[in-house]
Image: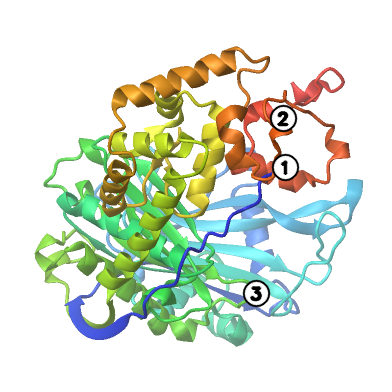
Amino acid sequence: MPSTPDATIGTLPDPRLEDRVAPKPAAHGAGVQAVLNDASRDLSVYSALHQLWYDVVGDREEEPGIAAVVDSDDLPWLEAPTPGREWVVKLTSSRWKAGTGTGDDYSAYYEYLLTFRERDENGDLHKTGQACSVRALPQFADLNYKDGESLTLQYGEGSLVKCQTTWADSSDEVEARMFDVLELVLDVDRGRLLADRNDESRRLTKVEAHHRFDIGWKRQVVETIDQTRGLIAYGGQSEIEAHQLRQREGYLEALLDADRWHLLGFPRTSYDIELNCYQAAGWTEIPREDPAHHPKLEASFAGATGDSALPHVDEWDEVLQTLREVVSSHLEWAGVGRDELIADDYQPGPASEEYRYTHPAGRREQLRERYEAVGTEIHREALKANTQAVYDILRVVATESGASYDTLEERTGLARSTIRYHVSRLAEIGVCEKVSNPVLVVFPSLAVLDEAEEILRRIYPEDQVDDMMERAEERRERREERDDPSSVDDQEESDDQDDDAGDGDRGRRSEWAYFEDLSLEAHQLANALDREYLDGDEVRVRTDRRDWVE
């Protein structure tokens, strides 16, 4: 299996930090959790909800049940329902990860979820722009996983309660809503809840900040997110998850989840931050005058890093400030000003109050440093000895501003397995990226695309389209003359895949081995297939002995 290249190709210049004033991003979704050490009481909160479920539901085929009808006047944070509807709290359950017993005697516990919904005259339930839910999970000493391993109780016995809601301005407000819901559906006193609450267990599970902006700036915002992802990966090894969805107009929406934002000058945190540019489902059918037509840029707390604990609720202001800085900085880098913000029913957009934040400057220098390094890699890859395969792949990607595997196979004449190998290797060193499904191979930014086009023109100035077409046809003819036409073109590509191979190894037929004879673990094979170091036609599975395999 090919070795994994080092994803780092350099280091970034240190950013400068400057104080700025900008429209304050709105706090959106929020979540907290707490353990109530109430196991010694006659009925814990979890047990009370378990009993309530039997009273109002009783059978999981009959879910959801209605735990309460709500008068919005009784809850100051709850807006009036849509005319013709009423607020209700629905109750559902789901199988949880722990229970009692083992093997055939194992019995799973269930978690219980209370969710606000609007109910119409026909009894149908509807989501709205305002949301609140409370989840209860057991924290009892006799609980274990199905394999018999005991459940770890980090904050003692009782009931683990989690609340998620929208449009809350503080962690105190979220916790108050959690207690409001429990008081509403259970015969429980708030004083008791406060007395049972384990202070150390009070943790943030969700914090979000966002701005909605005019759709005309979406491409610039997405480009800025892509640049940030590249900079973070370039500046050091990082846990990054990113995907892009190609939209009908050709724009890209982006999601970036990373743990090393401090490389760009943001505060160093013990948690991941997710930056997301997104739009409502079916936004293309929504009139431009409707705010839902326009995208949001949202930064959110995305869970603790490694073994770190979730932030305590007392850290709410600090976490939210960092998220707001990420949103404001990216909008400034993308050129989105106050006038380009869009108001909706829940936040004022261009009329947002100002706030002061720390802005990382020097991004232009950081990008230049990275693009110069990527340009060097493109030049080195395109000039690989004894082959023009990588050059042809890069040229097609540059000419087409992104190419699918089918296009690369047609235009270069290379085998699909060869293309996947080179693309995966190029993606590992930051020269190109794989986006969407089916895979589209692209350069990491428009700036890199422009530079790649110039580099490729300089490398082979006399190379014409007809020359590449001729190379492609020669490759196809050579493979057709071989016993295994889907194999790697040994005459031209083996130098890239096995630099140590002697001349006697060239032109050999495909070699196969049993999995049990390889020094390869199952998870390594799965990872190689998942990351496309191995193609699907390079792994065989015997099916005649196992009906379930088919």
Which one is nearer the viewer's eye here, 85 or 278? 278
- Alpha carbon separation for disc pair 1 and 2: 9 Å
Q: Which mark lies nearer to you, 3 or 1?
A: 1
| Residue type indicated by callout 1 | Leu
Locate residue 174, reporting x and y percent. Answer: 43, 74
Q: Are marks 1 and 2 in contact (CB under 8 Å)?
A: yes
Helix, strand or loop under label 1? helix
Is 369 on the left-hand or right-hand side of 268?
A: left
Q: Mark 2 — residue?
A: 539
The C terminus, quarter of image? top right
Locate residue 360, reporting x and y percent. Answer: 30, 78
Q: Mark 1 — residue?
A: 525
Q: If you read the primary sequence from the N terminus, does the residue marked by circle 3 or circle 2 appear first? A: 3
Q: If you read the primary sequence from the N terminus, does the residue marked by circle 3 or circle 1 appear first? A: 3
**Residue 71 visible somewhere in the drawing:** no
Q: Mark 3 — residue?
A: 307
- Alpha carbon separation for disc pair 3 and 1: 28 Å
In the picture shown, does residue 285 fall above or below 75? above
Q: Are marks 3 and 1 in contact (CB under 8 Å)?
A: no
Q: Residue at x 56, y 17 (%)?
A: 478
- Alpha carbon separation for disc pair 3 and 2: 36 Å
Image mark count: 3
Locate residue 67, reporting x and y percent. Answer: 52, 56
Q: Residue at x 57, y 60 (%)?
A: 6
**Residue 327 visible somewhere in the drawing:** yes
Q: Residue at x 64, y 15 (%)?
A: 482
Which one is nearer the viewer's eye here, 52 or 300? 300
Q: Residue at x 58, y 13 (%)?
A: 480
Is 213 on the left-hand or right-hand side of 48?
A: left
Which mark is on residue 481?
none
The N terminus, quarter of image? top right
